[in-house]
Amino acid sequence: MVAMKGTIDHTTPFFLAGFRLVPAGLLVLLWAALKGRRGPDSWRAWGWIGLFAIVDGTLFQGFLAQGLQRTGAGLGSVMIDSQPLAVALLALWLFGEHIGWIGWVGLLVGVAGISCLGLPEAFFQGAIDWQHLDVLGALFDNGQWLMLLAALSMAVGTVISRYVSRHVDSVVATGWHMVIGGIPLLLLSAQGETNQWQMMGGQDWLALGYATIFGSAIAYGLFFQAAATGSLTSLSALTFLTPVFALLFGNLFLGETLDALQTGGVCLTLVSIYLINQRDVLSGAAALEAEKLPKPVEAPVER
């Protein structure tokens, strides 16, 4: 996230998103071919890969790159890593994964945190003129909302990957979805953007290479390989530390700062992600403590 934010000032968002996906996808496909992984062999498999590519490739990376232009890397990372909230609901609905009361508390805390991050301070002060507000324009001019749309796209893509893995090897599907999903972004860049790489220096290319290899090829391959078989909600716990490091590096390298409302939103979002992904551990600990409590002694019944 910090690598992309540092580079985006010298390039264009759609070029950055597409260049991050297509080479990474080719690297994953090359690795899969060397390992003899099974490729798609039916129209149904290609259909699922295409849907996966549009949602998790084109939409996620497109919203991410556009959102990064309008928000900081640390704040943007918190918005992206709120996707376990959506994953938990989708996993409950589609796969019957357990949430529990601690998980529901985490979801409510997350809604409060995202509201602090995405809504302007004037909203909480009652100072918004709703009659003259361009709602749609305000949403898409606000980087936090674009990052929220990116998070929702990633959450839906995570769920779709479970269905994709039923028809094709998950690593192969990951590679193809990055290649197919990145092509529309490069086409959008070619049609509507200029000076995509003319202003980029050596450090920018290194940062983009890092984001492509480590942030896309390796991270995507490992993530969706685990998503094919493991608990989707529990897997999202891996994203818990991401915003912490992004906020730290955004402050150290990019000089980003948060206002009081956004700081509160960050804290609430992190607490919510922790509660959701550690709900089973916390529920077990609460049950264990309840068992240790002294039980009331019943008075003998006189006959």
Image (cartoon, helix red, strand yellow):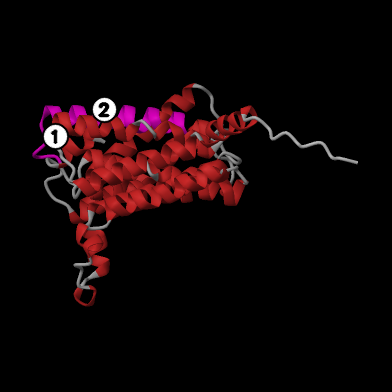
Is 46 placed left or right of 209 in the picture?
A: right
Q: Position of residue 230 (x, y in %)?
A: 57, 33
Task: Residue 40: name its quadrant.
Answer: top right
Of 36 and 265, the residue lying toward us: 265
Q: Position of residue 172 (x, y in %)?
A: 49, 34
Question: Residue 254's mark?
Answer: 1
The residue drawn where x is 16% and y is 29% is 252
Name, please, the residue furthest toward the top: 35
Residue identifier under label 2: 210
Pair 2/1: label in front: 1
Q: What is the quadrant of the C terminus in the image? A: top right
- Magenta segment boundaries in residue numbering: 197-223
Q: Position of residue 70 (x, y in %)?
A: 19, 50
Name, please, the residue furthest toward the bottom: 131
Upstream in sequence: badge 2 or badge 1: 2
Q: Amino acid at mark 2?
A: Tyr
In magenta stretch: residue 227? no
Q: Amino acid at mark 1?
A: Leu
Q: Position of residue 57 (x, y in %)?
A: 38, 45
